C-alpha cells in the first residue's frame, strides 16, 4: 500500500515537472529559462525556472516582468520588472527596467526588439535542474520520463486486465467440473 502510494506520488511529481517545464511551454509557444542571479528576489530567486511567453510591445506596462536581450542579437537574457515606459529621440517606445532587489533602475533602456516576452509563470528550484543538463540531455530525459510513464501505465493496465479475467476463469472452471 505504502509503495503504491509512493509510486503514485513520484509519478504525479514527474508529470508535473514535465508539464511545467516542457509540455506547456512548447504547446503555448513559450520558452523556459533559468534565473541565474538574485536581482529579482524575492519574486524569482536564483534557480527559479521562469516560463516566458511572447507579448505584444503595446501590452507591456509598468509592473510587467519581461525577459529581454541585453543587446539586440546578443543571446544573454535578463528578467526584470518594467518601472517606466517612454519614447526615445526617434519616437521608438522604450522601457526602463529594474530588478526587484536592485536599488536603482538599469542604466540602459530596453527597446521593443530586445524583448522576448513576459514571465508567464515560474517554478521555484526547477531552474537549478535546468542548468545542470544540456539541451540534448533535456530531450533524452524527457523521452525517458515519457517512456517510463507509458511503461508504468501499460503495467497497470495489464495487471487490471489479469485481475478481471481471473474470476471469469475460476467461474468457467467451476461450471465445467
Image: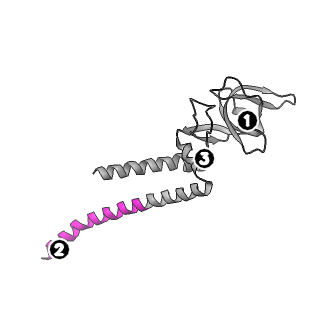
The residue where tag 3 is placed is 28
The residue where tag 2 is placed is 173
- The quarter of the picture where the C terminus appears is bottom left
Q: Are marks 2 and 1 in contact (CB under 8 Å)?
A: no
Mark 3–mark 1 Cα distance, whole angstroms, equals 18 Å
Mark 3–mark 2 Cα distance, whole angstroms, equals 55 Å
Residue 107 in the image: x percent, y percent?
76, 28
Pointer 2 or 1: first along the chain: 1
Residue 57 numbered mark, or none:
1
Q: Nearer the viewer, mark 3 or mark 2?
A: 3
Q: Is residue 4 magenta?
A: no
User: Of 67 and 101, which appears nearest the observer?
Assistant: 101
Q: Residue furthest bottom?
A: 177
Rendered position, 171 above or below 7: below
Rendered position, 164 above or below 3: below
Would residue 55 be seen by someone viewing this image from the given angle?
no
Rendered position, 173 above or below 66: below
Task: Identify the magenta region.
Answer: 151-177
Q: Nearer the viewer, mark 2 or mark 1?
A: 1
Rendered position, 48 above or below 81: below
Q: Secondary structure at mark 3?
A: helix
Amino acid at each position: 500500500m505504502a509503495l503504491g502510494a509512493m509510486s503514485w506520488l513520484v509519478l504525479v511529481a514527474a508529470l508535473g515537472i514535465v508539464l511545467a517545464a516542457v509540455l506547456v511551454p512548447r504547446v503555448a509557444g513559450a520558452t523556459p529559462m533559468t534565473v541565474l542571479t538574485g536581482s529579482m528576489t524575492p519574486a524569482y530567486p536564483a534557480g527559479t525556472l521562469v516560463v516566458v511567453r511572447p507579448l505584444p510591445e503595446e501590452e507591456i506596462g509598468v509592473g510587467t516582468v519581461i525577459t529581454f536581450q541585453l543587446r539586440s542579437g546578443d543571446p544573454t537574457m535578463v528578467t526584470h520588472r518594467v518601472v517606466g515606459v517612454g519614447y526615445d529621440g526617434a519616437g521608438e517606445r522604450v522601457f526602463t527596467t529594474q530588478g526587484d532587489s536592485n536599488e536603482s533602475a538599469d542604466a540602459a533602456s530596453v527597446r521593443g526588439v530586445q524583448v522576448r516576452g513576459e514571465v508567464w509563470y515560474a517554478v521555484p528550484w526547477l531552474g537549478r535542474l535546468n542548468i545542470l543538463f544540456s539541451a540534448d540531455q533535456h530531450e533524452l530525459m524527457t523521452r525517458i520520463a515519457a517512456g517510463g510513464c507509458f511503461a508504468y501505465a501499460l503495467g497497470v493496465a495489464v495487471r487490471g486486465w489479469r485481475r478481471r479475467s481471473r474470476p471469469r476463469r475460476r467461474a468457467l472452471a467451476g461450471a465445467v467440473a
